[in-house]
Amino acid sequence: MSGRMLRVNSIIREVLADEIERMSDTRLEFVSVISVDTSPSLREATVYVDVLGEDDQDEALRALRGAAKRLQAVLGSEVRMKYTPTLEFEIDPGVTSGRRIESILRDLPGVSEEE
C-alpha cells in the first residue's frame, strides 16, 4: 500500500474515532476504531472496529451502520478529498483471532495467569 493511502486511512480513522466518541448512542460506548481500508478509488472504506464485550458486537455494528451517513457527512466536512467514501463497518478479524489465541493459551495445562 502506498504512503498516500496509508495517510488517507490514518486520517479517516482519526476523524471517525473522534466522532464516534462524541456520539451519545450508548451502544457505541465501548467501540474502538482499529483501522480503515480505503479502496484505491477512494469511493469505499471498510472501517474495522473492536467492541469491548462480545455480546455487544452486533448492537454496536447496527448502531454504526445506522450512523454511517452522519459519519460520512462529518468525514466530508473535516477531510478534503475528491470523494467522500461510503463507509462499511466490520469487526476487526485480527482482534478476534488474538482473543481466541489468548483463550486457548489460557486453557493450556500449566499456564497460570501470572506468567
Image (cartoon, rainbow, N blue to C red):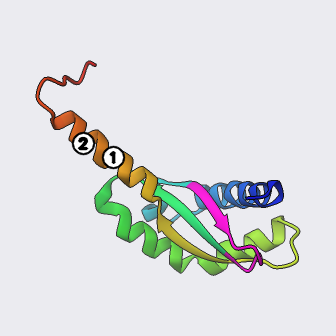
The answer to whether residue 41 is left or right of residue 111 is right
Left or right for 36, reference 41: left
Question: Camera-side residue: 81 or 77?
Answer: 81
Q: Which residue is drawn at 26% across and 18% down?
A: 114
What kind of residue is marked 1? Arg
The residue sitting at the left extreme is 109
Above or below, 9 relative to 62: above
Residue 42 on the magenta span: yes
Left-right relation of 112 to 58:
left
33 to 73, vertically: above or below: above
**Residue 53: % across, % down:** 33, 53
- Marks 1 and 2 sit apart, C-alpha to C-alpha, by 6 Å
The numbered mark at residue 103 is 2
Q: How many labels does the image show?
A: 2
| Secondary-structure class at tag 1 | helix
Circle 1 sits on which residue?
99
Where's residue 74, x and y in %? 74, 70
Labelled pair 1, 2 in contact (Cβ < 8 Å)? yes
What is the span of residues highlighted in magenta in the rendered image?
34-44
Residue pictured at 30% horizontal, 39% vertical: 102
| Quadrant that contains the N terminus | bottom right
